[in-house]
Image (tube, rainbow, N blue to C red):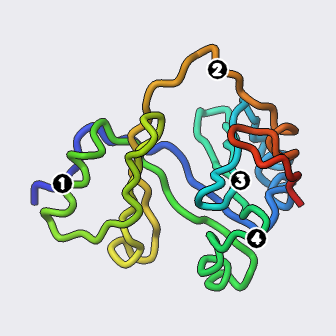
């Protein structure tokens, strides 16, 4: 079966909760994750996010819904309101080629978004991956001089595209 996607690498695991602040005692304090800068709000979808990195280079993305968002409603319903692992992220060299290959093989995809050259993505439906949501993303160019908000700025709602409302 010739299915493997070209240029694919595992990037991070995303964990969502109603409050990011509830995740910090485990992923930052206990496990030693370090915020290297960056993160912010996706106002269209309705969530706030940032990543922590660990000594071996692995990463965990922490996510929470923005006030009034329904983005995580079905996820929180499945997890009885607690949250947990939301998705696994893999980077691909060419999102178009990945979509074409997966579609040709009959896989159900959703959420294709190519509107931002900095981050193009599509999701492999959890029914295709034994209940796991898999995000395939093609990262784009980011200016090395671009400001990277601190963890405090992200939590205060002042990260990239921040809405100015602090995390609960």
The first of marks 3 and 4 along the sequence is 3
Q: Secondary structure at mark 4?
A: loop
Gap between marks 2 and 1 measured at Cα: 33 Å
Which structural element holds mark 3? strand
**Could you tell whether 142 is left or right of 26 in the image?**
left
Residue 79, disc: none
Examine the image and state in which quarter residue 154 appears: top right
Indicate which label's residue lies in the foreground, 3 or 4: 4
- Residues at marks 1 and 3, CA–CA distance in whole angstroms: 30 Å
The mark nearer the N terminus, 1 or 3, is: 3
Q: Gap between marks 4 and 2, in whole Å?
A: 30 Å
Mark 4 or mark 2: which is in front? 4
Q: Position of residue 133 (x, y in %)?
A: 46, 67
Mark 3–mark 4 Cα distance, whole angstroms, equals 12 Å
Query: Which residue is farthest top?
Result: 145
Residue for point 84% across, 37% down:
153
The crowding category of the residue bearing disc 1, from other C-alpha atoms within 10 Å (few below 14, some 14 to 19, many at least 20), is few
Instruction: Look at the numbered discs 4 and 2 and tell me whether their residues touch, using CB distance below 8 Å.
Output: no
What residue is shown with label 2?
146
Q: Which residue is mark 1?
A: 100
Q: Give the residue at mark 3.
A: 48
What's the residue at 17%, 55% (across, down)? 101
119 in relation to 13, above or below: above
Q: Are marks 2 and 3 in contact (CB under 8 Å)?
A: no
Q: Which residue is mark 4?
A: 68
As rendered, which of 11 and 155 lies closer to the eye?
155
Helix, strand or loop at disc 2? loop
Tell me whether circle 1 and circle 3 mark residues in contact (CB < 8 Å).
no
């Amino acid at each position: 079966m010739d299915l493997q996607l070209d240029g694919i690498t595992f990037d991070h695991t995303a964990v969502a909760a109603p409050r990011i602040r509830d995740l910090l005692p485990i992923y930052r304090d206990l496990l030693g994750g370090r915020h290297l800068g960056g993160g912010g709000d996706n106002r269209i979808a309705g969530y706030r996010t940032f990543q922590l990195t660990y000594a071996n280079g692995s990463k965990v993305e922490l996510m929470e819904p923005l006030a009034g968002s329904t983005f995580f409603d079905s996820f929180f319903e499945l997890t009885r309101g607690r949250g947990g692992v939301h998705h696994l992220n893999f980077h691909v060299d060419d999102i178009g080629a990945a979509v074409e290959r997966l579609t040709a093989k009959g896989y159900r995809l959703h959420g294709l978004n190519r509107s931002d050259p900095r981050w193009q993505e599509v999701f492999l439906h959890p029914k295709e991956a034994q209940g796991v949501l898999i995000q395939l993303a093609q990262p784009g160019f980011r200016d090395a001089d671009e400001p990277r908000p601190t963890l405090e700025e992200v939590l205060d709602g002042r990260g990239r595209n921040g809405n100015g409302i602090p995390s609960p």
